[in-house]
Image: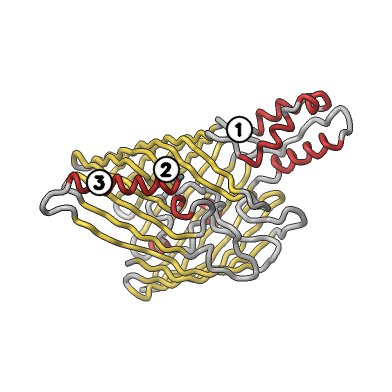
Amino acid sequence: MKTIRSLTTMLLFWVAITAFAKDSYPDFTVTGFGTLGASGTDTSQLSFRGTTKETPGVTDSWGFDSDSRLGLQLDAAINSSWHATVQWVARNTTGDFLEQNLDWAFLRWRPADNLDIRAGRLGFDTFMLSEYRNVGYAYLWMRPPHEFYGGLPIYHFDGADIAKKFTVGEGIMTIKAFGGHSFIQIPIPNSSVIADRSLSIAGGKLAYEVGNWNVRMSYSYLLNNLELAPLQPVLDGLNNAAVNTVWPSAQSLSQQISTKNKAFHYSSIGLAYDDGVWLTQLEASYIDTDLITYPSVANGYFSLGRRFGKLTLYSLFGISETLNNRVKFSNPLAPVPAVAALQNSIGRLSNLIGVDEKSISLGLRWDIHEHIALKTQWSHYWLGDNGTALWLAPASGPTPDMVNVWSVGMDFVF
């Protein structure tokens, strides 16, 4: 159904193009981008993945699918005011391969200079790499910083936005507001279950570019419209009358664990500088929630690079920390095995889904051609207790507290 909906959306855009076309229009442009990358680690006890939408990840057995992707973009200038864009990216993702990888399919109207109104499938514009998160050629690293982008499985939403640019001093200020709906599918660790998430989204950004500097701030409000399917058996157990007799606090825990109609508040700030020789970029964000199954998280990174002709050396430092304290529950009134098993399940849900990760990376980029760049990167990760939510950990058993990840790849655009 989601695939049919996406194809219908694309068809409607082409109908619109035909309806508005004049003698000299439409003007079509086809572009593309891609990455051929391979990564491996020094452990078999934990799998590294670029984002939480990926599976199975890579271990000490190297793999290609975590970093490799291929994207195609079709742009059509319908006339001087109307423009249509479709972008689809083949990448490692969970769920419907065609629908989940359709990132852009929108119609843009420019009623006046420096004013854009768009509707359709749009990129989730709440961080600095929003417009080119999948275009490896557009940034230094092998992949977007893991601590900051690894826990952001939202690539797009269906809705509308409006953006206005102003001249402020010697620079350009952009104000944008957006809203809509996002349907995403994410894997549940240690199972074959794919969880559907339906989110209502609203937010905005403020950006300023002047000289070699680029700064931006953004805020997004996300409301979860569906209950996560894997949680339903636990919620049914907590709401069971017999369980509440033995464990009086069970029903109140059900309200805390439920994800339906619960909100996420995502705030971020970013700063970048590029004078052609030195490159630096940093971002920081805070995800505020009231869910004990999805604790609030603060994360950020800092990157510094230096160009030497066609070679660029870079370093990258990242951090992501769950801020909530470990949750403690009252014990049942009687040692009933079924209730004890339910209590253990809730403990795992509440305290094992957390992030405690720090990293340092060193890398080299070589621009061997105007449209081709070769990269290699080493990353060292420090992982705290119960802090491997961005990785794929085994259902039981110890996991390493330090992991090295090596990567090589080729980025290209055409």
The local secondary structure at tag 2 comes to: strand
Q: Is residue 234 above or below residue 245?
A: below
Decide if residue 23 is on the left or right side of residue 329: left
Label annotation for residue 344: none
- How many residues crowd mark 3 within 10 Å: few (<14), some (14–19), many (20+)? few
User: Which residue is tagged 1?
Assistant: 290
Give x and y (percent) for residue 2. Answer: 45, 45
Q: Marks 3 and 1: which is nearer the front?
A: 3
Decide if residue 297 is on the left or right side of residue 21: right
Give x and y (percent) for residue 377. Answer: 52, 68
The local secondary structure at tag 3 comes to: helix
Give x and y (percent) for residue 80. Answer: 16, 47
Give x and y (percent) for residue 224. Answer: 53, 35
Marks 3 and 1 sit apart, C-alpha to C-alpha, by 44 Å
The local secondary structure at tag 1 comes to: loop
Tell me which residue sits at (16%, 48%) in the image. Answer: 21
User: Which residue is tagged 3?
Assistant: 15
Q: Marks 1 and 2: which is nearer the front?
A: 2
Tell me which residue sits at (45%, 44%) in the image. Answer: 269
Sequence-earlier tag: 3 or 2: 3
Outermost left residue: 23
Sequence-earlier tag: 3 or 1: 3
Q: Is residue 197 above or below residue 379?
A: above
User: Which residue is tagged 2?
Assistant: 157
> Which image quarter: residue 317?
bottom right
Q: Amino acid at mark 1?
A: Asp
Q: Marks 3 and 2: which is nearer the front?
A: 3
